[in-house]
Image: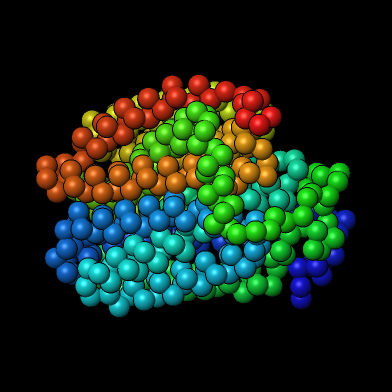
Amino acid sequence: MTPARLARLTTGRFHYAWVVLGIMFAVMLAAAAVRATPSVLIVPLEHQFGWSAATISAAISLNIVLFGLIGPFAAALMQTLGLKPTILLALSVLAAAVLASAFITTQWQLFLTWGLLVGIGSGAMAGGLAATVANQWFETRRGLAVGLLMASNASGQLVFLPVLAALAQAGHWRAVSFVVAGVVALIIPVVLIALPTDAARIGLLPYGARAARPAQASGNPLAVALGALAMSVRSSDFWLLFGSFAVCGFSTNGLIGTHLISFCVDHGIPETEGAALLASMGVFDLIGTTASGWLTDRYNARYLLFWYYGLRGLSLVVLPFTGFDPVSLGVFAAFYGLDWIATVPPTVALATEVFGRRSAPVVFAWILAGHQVGAAIAAFGAGEVRTLSGSYLPAFVASGIACLLASGLVLRVNRPVAVVAG
């Protein structure tokens, strides 16, 4: 069975682009589950080895930073080498790294596996992948495609957490690594069999297209990635998107994704219940980010981002003062889940509008690097604040204020006629 034969089976029923979208949904779901795993290991590793929350958070921060920095080069590699080889290589690195993490006994091994290797492997499947798939396979419905893929990216970080937290809390934290490595390994043969290099290789046009796209770019991926950066940094719109997306990472992956479980434990809520809270956010995120993609196809992306960041900021400021009762936590989980990464589809849309469809995946990957820098600062900073003061309160308030500032920044992103003309 080959992608071309599978495509012939779908002829007359639906476009094979939706199959590709489904495969990529599973890939990003698995990769996101890997990146979420360290959040359930913070407490077990503290108990097992006596490592501080700040030390473990530093390894997670390295993971997050690499996730952002690798993204542009991975997106350029997808444009030059191809989507399929890049994904297969990244999945193989992830599976090997997570499997090796089951045998760690020292801090340098923690940094090597969960920090360095997982950061590199997951970075290849960051938001640049969503933008690449959407722009290569979809002429129409690109916002919806990005929304679905990024929903899987966030939901994968959350929906696996209850099972993983239950294993970790039962004293089987090494089993967590075995389970996650197995999930990643199962995706590899699916990609190998069913994912085509591009639409033209199986005789198709992108979904909604009336003419063939230009051939795949050639050249040095390093030059492609750095060239896109050199071009984009001359635009103030790039820095507005970069800065606002850094706040997005600060308030999601870095703060909530990494520390909400520990925050719940500080308030007497068991680790498994904190993980279930994050998992419920994953369910709502699937709805919210998909809906955001639908809205992005129809409404002004700037105004969507204004509301997303503004409402998120208010919720972060309010949460520490709710008393952590079931009702307030349930409302927060639903609201925050809907808003988790609803910012991605409109941000991708603005990057495409500013820099053009061909350059947008690599440029967005650089913008995503800002997201991960913000996330890394929150992951490490919140852990350090908790270690020094015994409370996460200052971190939540700071994150909320940053979101309110970002809601104003995004309104200043302009339609860049001059940049496109240049």
Image quadrant where one finds the N terminus? bottom right
Return the residue nearer the eye: 350 or 273: 350
Total count of labels: 0
Q: Position of residue 329 (x, y in %)?
A: 33, 39
Q: Is residue 269 left or right of residue 275?
A: left
Q: Is residue 208 visible?
A: yes
- Is residue 18 shown to the viewer in this render? no
Q: Residue at x 22, y 68 (%)?
A: 107
Residue at the far left: name it: 389
* Image location (x, y in percent) of residue 284: 49, 43
Residue 386 position within the rendered picture, expressed as x and y whole percent measured from the top left: 17, 45
Name the colour scheme.
rainbow
Q: Residue at x 75, y 40 (%)?
A: 140
Please identify the quarter of the rendering in which residue 50 is found. bottom left
Would residue 58 be found to the left or right of residue 8 on screen?
left
Q: Quadrant of the C terminus?
A: top right
The correct choice, above or below, for 340 with respect to 86 in the image is above
Identify whether 253 is placed above or below 217.
above
Q: On the image, which quarter does residue 8 sit in?
A: bottom right
Identify which residue is drawn at 21% across, 41% down.
Answer: 392
Above or below for 201 versus 192:
above
Q: Would residue 312 appear left or right of 88 to someone viewing this image?
A: left
Determine the residue positioned at 50% across, 21% down: 412
Q: Position of residue 381 (x, y in %)?
A: 24, 44
In the figure, 211 relative to 78: above or below?
above
